[in-house]
Image (cartoon, rainbow, N blue to C red):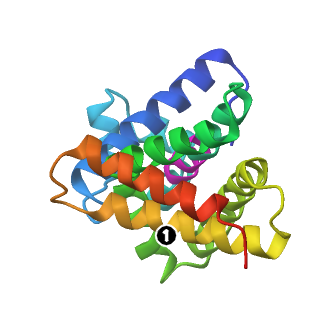
């Protein structure tokens, strides 16, 4: 249900932010609407006016975070920097985001998608939107790639970002991020033989 008033929109956003914090801090198994309502200083019934179930709320929190990743890509595309500089910035920003709370939420999504059709569909939608945004950027970096080759490289770069975010002991984080950026550029600019 979409709130029609400014207060309703504000309350909905406050719930989503609080739910995101709770999901990241405690995980999905310990994610309880009653506890969230209490932490937000509201009654459970008021919270459930906006989100009837924890599944619905978790769904919207994950969807919100995923939209931010697409915004990162689109923001760098529109910033006016060269396409290669935009790709470097996107990689850095996404690895940083995915090493934080966003990575935890996506792990939750992956687990929920194994047993819940709605989350499986969300997983597919999130990656479809993400791949589409990244394909636009990669096309700017290397317009000579066929659509098929562009798709493959987008998935490889996504795997690089995913895997990089999962690394715990990386030493000098700045040097690590620079190497990830360099490898993403190599994947993007190397022309097929």
Q: Is residue 66 magenta?
A: yes
Name above or below for residue 158 compared with residue 182: below
Residue 49: x, y in percent?
A: 56, 40
User: Which of the two residues, 116 or 147, is positioned nearer the viewer here?
Assistant: 147
- In the image, taking residue 146 as reference, residue 168 lies left or right, namely left
Q: Name the residue that disc number 1 marks.
A: 159
- In the image, taking residue 81 as reference, residue 109 lies left or right, namely left
Rendered image quadrant of residue 80: top right
User: Which of the two residues, 180 or 49, is positioned nearer the viewer here?
Assistant: 180
Name above or below for residue 27 compared with residue 150: above
* Residue at (31, 47) in percent of width and height: 100
Residue 70: x, y in percent?
A: 64, 45
- In the image, taking residue 17 as reference, residue 174 lies left or right, namely left
Q: Which type of secondary structure does the marked residue at label 1 adopt?
A: helix
Instruction: Give the quarter of the figure containing the N terminus.
Output: top right
Query: Looking at the image, can residue 35 be seen?
Result: no
User: Which of the two residues, 7 or 114, is positioned nearer the viewer here?
Assistant: 114
Rendered image quadrant of residue 161: bottom left
Residue 172: x, y in percent?
A: 18, 46
Query: Looking at the image, can residue 173 be seen?
Result: yes
* Residue at (19, 60) in percent of width and height: 168
Which residues make up the magenta segment?
Answer: 61-68
* Residue at (37, 46) in percent of width and height: 178
Instruction: Give the quarter of the figure containing the C terminus.
Output: bottom right
Majority secondary structure of magenta residues: helix
User: Which of the two residues, 75 or 187, is positioned nearer the viewer here?
Assistant: 187
């Amino acid at each position: 249900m979409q709130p029609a008033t400014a207060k309703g929109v504000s309350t909905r956003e406050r719930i989503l932010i609080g739910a995101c914090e709770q999901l990241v801090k405690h995980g999905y198994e310990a994610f309880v609407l009653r506890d969230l309502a209490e932490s937000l200083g509201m009654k459970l019934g008021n919270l459930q006016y906006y989100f009837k179930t924890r599944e619905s709320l978790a769904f919207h929190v994950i969807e919100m975070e995923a939209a931010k990743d697409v915004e990162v890509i689109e923001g760098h595309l529109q910033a006016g920097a060269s396409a290669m500089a935009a790709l470097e910035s996107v990689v850095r920003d996404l690895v940083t985001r995915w090493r934080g709370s966003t990575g935890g939420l996506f792990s939750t999504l992956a687990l929920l998608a194994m047993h819940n059709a709605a989350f499986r569909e969300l997983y597919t939608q999130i990656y479809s939107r993400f791949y589409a945004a990244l394909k636009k950027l990669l096309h700017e970096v290397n317009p000579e790639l066929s659509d098929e080759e562009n798709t493959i490289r987008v998935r490889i770069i996504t795997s690089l970002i995913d895997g990089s975010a999962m690394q715990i002991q990386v030493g000098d984080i700045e040097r690590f991020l620079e190497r990830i950026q360099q490898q993403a550029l190599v994947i993007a600019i190397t022309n097929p033989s």
